[in-house]
Image: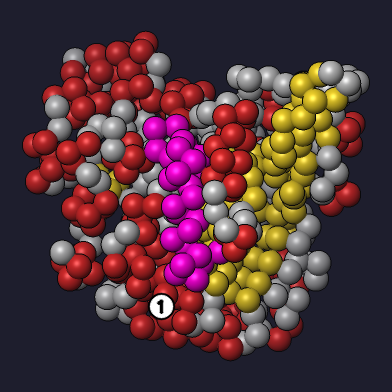
Amino acid sequence: MQDAAAHAKFKPYTRQSIKQAPQWERLHRDQREAVDVVSRILPFRVNAYVLDHLIDWDRVPDDPIYRLTFPHRDMLPDNEYLDMHRMISGGAPEAQIDEFVRSIRMRMNPHPAGQMTHNVPTLDGVALRGLQHKYRETVLFFPGAGQTCHAYCTFCFRWPQFVGMEELKFDAKESQELCAYLRRHPEVTDVLVTGGDPMVMNARSLAEYLDPLLAPELAHVQSIRIGTKSVAYWPQRYVTDKDADDLLRLFERVVGAGRNLALMAHYSHPRELEQPVAQQAVRRIIATGATVRIQAPLIRHVNEDAACWSELWTTGVKLGATPYYMFVERDTGPSSYFKLPLVKAYQVFQQAYRSVSGLARTVRGPSMSAFPGKVMVDGIVELGGEKLLALQFLQARNPLWVRRPFYAKYDAQASWLDELRPAFGERFFFEADQPAAPSSLLQPIAIHPSRTSPGPATERPPC
Ligand code: SF4
């Protein structure tokens, strides 16, 4: 079994091809129907490694990795599900289906936290659609070739990247604009290369994006982070893929250039670290001098159990990785299916945190990546006889807000920052001082002329 997983061939399945997977026969008729209906709206992709080695088919549909990767009927309200089903089975014209699909997607808050309205930076007055700059010291970069994943998570907050809504997509054809932007922003110390999953790129393509960042004039970029779930969905990327060694040499080159290289490894469940190939992947990455940081959202149906988190963090520490974040499920996509109340999230976090050693207590959370910043639920307290939620910013649009405690009225049902009410006064302290919250209607932003040019150049000029 160990060799079978390590030497598995990468074989993706989508809505069109999933019927060819041997496991398809094991699904009940209703489950198959739900996959077909819901995946018209939300992206669906798995691969043979996930099907053969991560999902426990005896536990389907309650298996956490099945819940994580396969669409379910409850992800849509009944009326939308039934209307969609009627259209498909009644042979409605494609244009009518597309219009209905689009209306549901727009209802699902496709770009939460002002990603498209407030985080896109400009260069000489032109919006850079492949970048986000929300926090002073960190820029997010979306390489065009990395805007897919080895499998898709059903809760994904980046789902608009995968459904063909071009006007809602972030992607950069090349790193020239990033480098030009960074040269003018010496305050930026960290670049997060993200997606999708940048690790779907081969080593050569990834190098074309990373090498320019190592130029001496960008020495202020001290840390290069790569956000990835490949470590869970396709760990062979670092072990047996034909360019796995080239990839590790690239990591060594980044580290050798004096930069901190951190893989922001998205693990949702300890099962993703059970396979020997998954463990070997972590060890091989760390041997290059890069670090592996474990992070994921807390998701109902998938990892709402404290024991699950303590096992994940403990296994990670044993392999040399660093527990980093437990996030709160974002208010986008089918969030009503996955979200948990903040009070419950805090309880799960606290119980898991208490049960692990100090080395695993590097983890922070539960944290909401909300419009004003990353807000951590820090505790449930009693002040003046009233039960309150203690909160603080771990990151913020305004750096002065960071680590400033504030309080909200206790609310056992609230699952996001905007559902909380201030404990004292009319408004939270940061509400007087923040840019206007984004309109629910997204305004498409100007596209840089270079985006209309042909695809990525094979040779990328240095920064
Ligand atoms: S791997 Fe990350 S970007 Fe890809 S679907 Fe999952 S959460 Fe979304």
Can residue 96 be found in the magenta stretch? Answer: no
Report whether residue 71 is seen. yes
The crowd level at tag 1 (other Cα within 10 Å; few <14, some 14-19, many 20+) is: some
User: How far across and how far down the image is residue 9, in percent?
Assistant: 19, 65
Q: Is residue 286 left or right of residue 383?
A: left
- Kind of residue sitting beneath label 1: Arg
User: Dividing the image into 4 quarters, which one contains the C terminus?
Assistant: bottom right
Report whether residue 160 is seen. no
The relative height of residue 98 versus residue 13 in the rendered view (above or below) is: above
Q: Is residue 88 left or right of residue 448?
A: left
The relative height of residue 353 versus residue 415 in the rendered view (above or below) is: below
User: How far across and how far down the image is residue 81, in percent?
Assistant: 33, 17
The residue under label 1 is 284
Q: Which residues are magenta?
A: 296-322
At a point 39% along the width and 52% down the height, the residue shown is 270
User: How far across and how far down the image is residue 209, in percent?
Assistant: 53, 73
Q: Nearer the viewer, residue 12 or 262?
A: 262
At a point 62% along the width and 28% down the height, the residue shown is 343
**SS at mark 1 in the image:** helix
Q: Nearer the viewer, residue 461 or 40?
A: 40
Q: Is residue 185 left or right of residue 86?
A: right
User: How far across and how far down the image is residue 68, in percent?
Assistant: 36, 40
In which quarter of the view is residue 149 placed? bottom left
Number of numbered discs overlaid on the protein picture: 1
